[in-house]
Image (cartoon, rainbow, N blue to C red):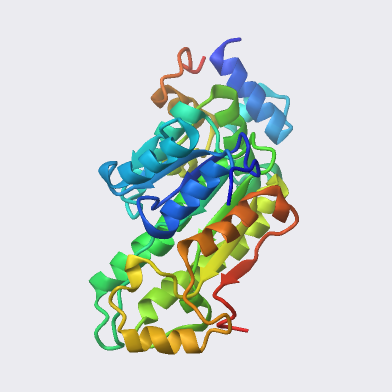
Amino acid sequence: MGLTTLLENKVALVTGSSRGIGKEIACLFAKNKAKVILHGVTEEHCQATAQEIENITGDRPPVFAANLSDLPQVEQMFKEIFKQVKGLDILVNNAGVLEDRLIGMISADNLETIFSVNTFGTLHCLQLASRLMRKSTAPSIINLSSIIGVQGAAGQTAYAASKAAVIGITKSAAKELGPQGIRVNALAPGLIETNMIEHLSDRAIGSHIENTPLGRLGSPNDVAKAALFLASDLSSFITGQTLQVDGGLRV
Amino acid sequence: MHTLKRLMNVFSTVLEIDDETTIKNLEYNTIPKWDSVGHMQLIAAIETEFDILMETEQIIDMNCFDMACSILGDHGIDNITRK
């Protein structure tokens, strides 16, 4: 995809943009002329993405580090964003963690880890970002859920719960923030080729592909293009929706 | 304009109350206009007027005009002492 202008003059924060889907979304947004703000657990984690965006736009994007499960750290990050850029047009709540655990082996620590990033972190960022979107003419929030949050998966009960909660957050926030003109949607990717699926066996991946009508795994770019749609005015009358990016896996 | 007056104007506009004494003695959730929706409108108006971003705890704690003064003071807004 070449350089286009779907997000011209839009300021977009992409959490978890150091790699995988987040990195792809950040780069595609930059190609579409958004002013992208990167986020990672540390600033060092995002340097590769920052360099790639600098190669695209000629400008190095700002990078912020924060543990999204820690509200004071998230608030500090948004204060810094407020100081530096004043307002936001787009938030992509992408940062997440995945941990497989069978029922009976899910500890309180596992739950805490998964929910604190996937669910609480999403909500923390959404709360703060919505307050930086007051002056935006077309604000949009995109939450990364998962096909697992929609239909569940054996061995991923905690992860599924955390991602199903993201859909609940999305629907409620869409209703509450709609009167302010803020659209809130979710993406539910299927199996995407990132390092988050490295632990899966070839057999499991093969079986997944067999069940996918489009007959392949998804790529981070597939998800990024859906995020671009939801971030841009192309989806101007769409809010509260969960868009599945799964090759038809769940039809 | 004096900071206190600016804050009073924000409360007056959002809560649609003209009387300053009434505003100074008002508490959260004691009138229909200052319910949770009105509260977030008040927060938005204060943040816009003073170009600040409040912390979540401050939003929750801001239950009266005096507390709003105190929060503005925490953000380094000058001349906020209540007269």
Which image quarter: residue A62? top left
Asked whether A205 or B24 is in front, the reply is A205
In depth, the one of A185 and A70 nearer the eye is A185
Q: Give the left or right position of residue A108, taking residue B3 as reference.
A: left
Q: Is residue A156 above or below residue A177?
A: below
> Is residue A126 visible to us here?
no
Most distant residue in the front direction: A2
State the residue lying farthest toward the top.
B1
Does A176 sit left or right of A237 as displayed? left
Q: Residue at x 44, y 27 (%)?
A: B70
Question: What x and y, as percent, mark residue B36?
Answer: 61, 49
Position of B56 relative to B20 (above/below): below
Q: Position of residue A35 (x, y in %)?
A: 52, 36
Residue A218's x, y, as percent? 49, 71
Q: Is residue A7 visible?
A: yes
Residue plotted at (29% across, 41% down): A43
- Which quadrant would the N terminus of chain B be assigned to in this image? top right
The residue depicted at 46 percent of the width and 70 percent of the height is A163
Q: Is residue B26 above or below residue A214?
A: above
Residue in the foreground of this view, choosing between A6 and A110 = A6
Q: Name the one closer to the observer, A216 or A151.
A: A216
Where residue A236 appears, x then y in whole percent? 73, 52
